Amino acid sequence: MSREHGPVDPGRLLTALGIEGRVLAEAVHAAPLEAPVPACPGWSLGEVARHVGSVYRLVRRRLADGRTPEDWQRDPEPGRPLHEFLETGLAELLDELAAHEPQERADTWWPADPTYGFWRRRMLHETLIHRVDVEQASGADPRGVPDDLAIDGIDEALTLWFGHKLPMLGLTGTKAGSVGVRTGAHSWIARAGPETTEAWRCSAEEAEAADDVVTAKPAQVYLWLWGRASLTSVTVRGVHDQAAQLWALLRLATR
């Protein structure tokens, strides 16, 4: 059975994916491809663009075939610019996603949500985070992150990457404790330690009772959780150990 939908309607996620994908392609077209990406050590702006364009094709093939393909396009054709590689991959992925209802069953890597809706959300945040990477690498003025998409991305970072990907990789924290994450009217708990790695949506009161409590505007929390903002970009109440551990564990989950 699929998990309940996240904070944002699946139709909004698909529309936002189209918008963010086009913005990303435009930013890549205007930027120096050799520029280093601060949040992805060792990667250039061009490598980020190549990665996203490749993932678009991988996911479309996975959805069409019902399994992860062994053979899929990882680079543009010779002489084809990277922004066109992004635009073509995005268009094909959008067509595949739009042809299916979000609750329709699909092959995913999260047993809690084997639906097309999973990929609407996953590919939006893949695109949005790497759009931020391109802006940071090129020095372009940041376009910002809408509050509703930031809240959805916070939920994905905590429930999918922290609560599922870390256990799947066998990675745990060193010190048991909890972090409450609060922004706007939304709250979460993330609990980590040698025995447990889990996260869930909760009440404001439950979040406030955690060992550390992280608060900031939605976009700030979103970028902080995804490693695109520094540890000091959010407000932390408590001893700070658990918030720092959460931030470090998410770097391992999303690298």
Image: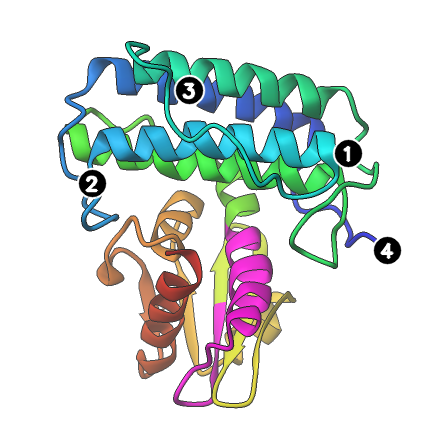
Residue 196: x %, y % from top left = 56, 84
Q: Is residue 179 magenta?
A: yes
Does label 3 or label 1 sit earlier along the sequence? 3
Left or right: residue 94 versus residue 128 is right
Residue segment shown in magenta: 154-180
Q: Quadrant of residue 71?
A: top right
Does label 2 or label 1 sit earlier along the sequence? 2
Q: Amino acid at mark 3?
A: Leu
Disc marking residue 37: 2
Residue 49 visible here: yes
Disc marking residue 7: none
Distance from the alpha carbon under mark 2 to that under mark 3:
18 Å
Q: Nearer the viewer, mark 2 or mark 3?
A: 3
Distance from the alpha carbon under mark 1 to that under mark 4:
13 Å
Residue pointed to by mark 3: 86
Residue pointed to by mark 1: 102
Does label 3 or label 4 sit earlier along the sequence? 4
Residue 156: x %, y % from top left = 56, 52
Distance from the alpha carbon under mark 2 to that under mark 1:
33 Å
Seen as rendered, the residue at the extreme front is 71
Residue 177: x %, y % from top left = 47, 86
